[in-house]
Amino acid sequence: MNGGAWWSGGLYFSCLGCGRCCAESPGTVRFTPDEELAMANLLMVSASEFRARYVWRRYGKPSLRERANYDCVFLSPSARYCVVYGAHPAQCREFPFWPEVLSSKESWDRFALSCVGMNQGDFHDGAEISARLQRQLDAQKSSCQLRRDG
């Protein structure tokens, strides 16, 4: 998958837990049915209650809600950590190895302006990045559909 991609030689990234990737700009967070159940279980609510409280339709598909300031509904406003971290969706786990971030060196550098963990820390080789991209594409294919059942 990485062929001659600009990132095929690898990239440096370590999450520093700042929460900036979950805040301050609008976004869409997709999740699979299994991820939905895992988050609901972690919060000790039913799937239908989870959907009613934390999910809305974005571009025709379910997405985690945002607050008025664009922070993810699960980003703790005071401590700046994810309250569903133990069950957060693959999309969140794979940041910054998203297709739109890796589309060009310029895009990577633009995202790195707000993510202090990019371009430092752990080295991720091209094969790992390619696998992470593939997981993103697979997750997009199986993203959750809103259901009327509970």
Image (cartoon, rainbow, N blue to C red):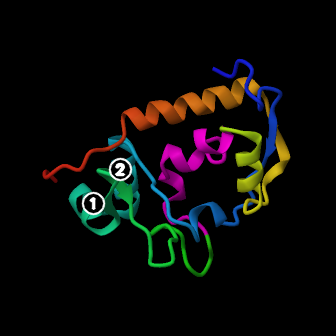
Q: Are marks 1 and 2 in contact (CB under 8 Å)?
A: yes
User: In the rendered view, does 49 fall on the left or right side of 128?
Assistant: left
What is the three-letter code of the residue carrying label 1?
Arg
Q: Residue at x 73, y 55 (%)?
A: 110
User: In the rendered view, does 135 fall on the left or right side of 122?
Assistant: left
* SS at badge 1: helix
* SS at badge 2: helix
What is the three-letter code of the residue carrying label 2?
Glu
Mark 1 lies on residue? 51
Name the residue nearer the viewer: 112 or 76.
112
In the rendered image, which quarter is residue 78 located in?
Answer: bottom right
How far from the left and from the top, in percent, is residue 130? 65, 27
Q: Residue at x 32, y 43 (%)?
A: 33
How far from the left and from the top, in percent, is residue 12? 82, 42
User: In the rendered view, does 78 fall on the left or right side of 84?
Assistant: right
In the rendered image, which quarter is residue 56 located in?
Answer: bottom left
Name the residue nearer the viewer: 132 or 57.
57
Return the disc, 1 or 2, that comes first in the chain's sequence. 2
How far from the left and from the top, in percent, is residue 24? 58, 71
Mark 2 lies on residue? 36
Q: Please, is residue 5 above or below residue 20 in the view?
A: above
Where, quadrant-wise, is the N terminus in this rendering?
A: top right
Disc 1 versus disc 2: distance between alpha carbons? 9 Å
Tell me, yes or no, whether the highlighted magenta stretch contains residue 101: yes
Q: Residue at x 65, y 41 (%)?
A: 97
Which span is picked out in magenta?
Answer: 81-102
In the rendered image, which quarter is residue 101 located in?
Answer: top right
